[in-house]
Structures are given as structure tokens and as C-alpha cells.
Amino acid sequence: VIKAVRMLETARIRMLPWEGDDEPAFRRLATDPRVMLHISGGEPWGDEKIREFLTRQIRQQRELGFCIWKLVLKEVGEVIGICGLQPLAGTSDIEIGWWLAPEQWGKGIAVEAARAALAYAFDSLGLTRVVAVAHLGNEPSVRTMEKLGMTFECNTTHKGVEVVKYAIEKK
Ligand SMILES: CC(C)(COP(=O)(O)OP(=O)(O)OC[C@H]1O[C@@H](n2cnc3c(N)ncnc32)[C@H](O)[C@@H]1OP(=O)(O)O)[C@@H](O)C(=O)NCCC(=O)NCCS
């Protein structure tokens, strides 16, 4: 039985499921060329893609007990990024992922949130392996994987784009 998470919390961040009125907050991230540089080549996502993403996350939370959660900075109560777990398209793996608003880069927030997501994956969901993929050249994302103790697995293609794939096994 999958126990639905109500909330993951770290020192600075609350990690929460999405709600209907979160669309503007997610749109700010998904239309910022700095955030999207290594995701869509800097192209902002359109409304349809934004809604698809949110609908999928809400469904995954309900059906699987996890999703790519919103990150709320506790100090200000605002959505400043996303981090969480989802099935990696075209594989049987579960991936961890992260995007942050540029104002929040370089403060260790991605690693802080991702550690909580990994602990949840291994200790609560009972997963034995979590992977991550990043476009070649996404140095901050790869450094985040390495800081989490993930190790390089292979170069592969994901949705037609060349990526590096990292993995971590339950200890
Ligand atoms: C990837 C991302 C979430 C990292 O977030 P962050 O909170 O800045 O990362 P952290 O502060 O936890 O730092 C993680 C590591 O990356 C390093 N790093 C951060 N920015 C970097 C940069 N521009 N170049 C090289 N390394 C960088 C940090 O220094 C740190 O490593 P260190 O401790 O060895 O120095 C953030 O850069 C981001 O949102 N990027 C845009 C969205 C994106 O590409 N997401 C990933 C898709 S696969």
C-alpha cells in the first residue's frame, strides 16, 4: 500500500503537492529562459505544456504517492522551484529532478530538497534505485547529482536529446 505524503520538510523548504491555483507560480519557472536553458534550450513552455505538467504531477501524486513537488521557501511562503520523483519516460526507472528560480541558485537548496526526496524514496516508498538525467553541459545539475552521492551510469538519449544518466541505490 502506498502511503500518500502530506508534506516533506527541510530546514528551509516545504515540498508539497500541486494545487489548481499554483499554475502562475509554475509558469514563472517554466517561462524563464535561464531556468529552461538546459531543459528546452531556453524556450519558454507554452500554456498547454504547463497544464500537462501540472495535471500529470497531480495524477502521479494521487496514483503513486509521489511527484515532482513544488518547493515553498518557508521564510517567505513562496514557490521558488520544483523537486521530486517521477517515472522516467521510456524506462522502468524513477527519476529525481529539480528546477529553481535563478534568485535561489547557489545556496544549496537543490541538494537540501533532493536529499529529502531521496530519503522519502528509499525509506517510505521502498524504492531501491533512483536515477537522474541532465542535458550534456548542465554542470549545476550534474554537480547536484554528485553531491547527493549519485554516480555516472551512461550517456543516453531522453526524448531525443543526449543526456547523462546518474543513479543511486538504496544503502
Ligand atoms: C540545477 C539547479 C537546480 C541547482 O540548484 P542549486 O540550488 O543552485 O544547487 P546547489 O546550490 O545545491 O549546488 C549544487 C552544486 O552545483 C554547483 N553549481 C551551482 N551552480 C553552478 C554553476 N553555474 N556552475 C557550476 N556548478 C554550479 C554548486 O556549486 C554545488 O556544488 P559545490 O558544492 O561542489 O560547489 C539550478 O542550477 C537550476 O535550477 N537550474 C535550472 C534548471 C535545471 O537545469 N534543472 C535541472 C534539469 S536536469
Image (cartoon, rainbow, N blue to C red):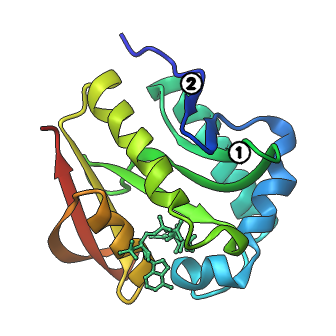
Nearest the viewer among 112 and 136 is 112
Q: Residues within 10 Å of mark 2 (few under 14, many from 20)?
A: some
Residue 146, quarter of the rendered image: bottom left
Query: Which residue is at a point 39% across and 52% down the rendered structure image?
Result: 96
Q: Earlier in the sequence, mark 1 or mark 2?
A: 2
The residue drawn where x is 82% and y is 47% is: 76
* Residue type marked 1: Val
Q: What amino acid is at disc 2?
A: Arg
How far separated are the C-alphas under marks 1 and 2? 20 Å
Question: In screen coordinates, is 152 left or right of 141?
Answer: left
Q: Is residue 134 above or below residue 80?
A: below
Above or below 133: residue 72: above
Return the residue at label 1: 72
Residue 117 in percent (x, y) is at 42, 41
Q: Which residue is mark 2?
A: 62
Q: Position of residue 115 (x, y in %)?
A: 39, 46
Classify mark 1: helix, strand or loop: strand
Closer to viewer: mark 1 or mark 2:
1
Residue 30 place in picture, x, y as percent:
71, 68
Q: How many marks?
A: 2
How many C-alpha atoms fall within 10 Å of the one at disc 1: few (<14), some, or many (≥20)? Answer: some
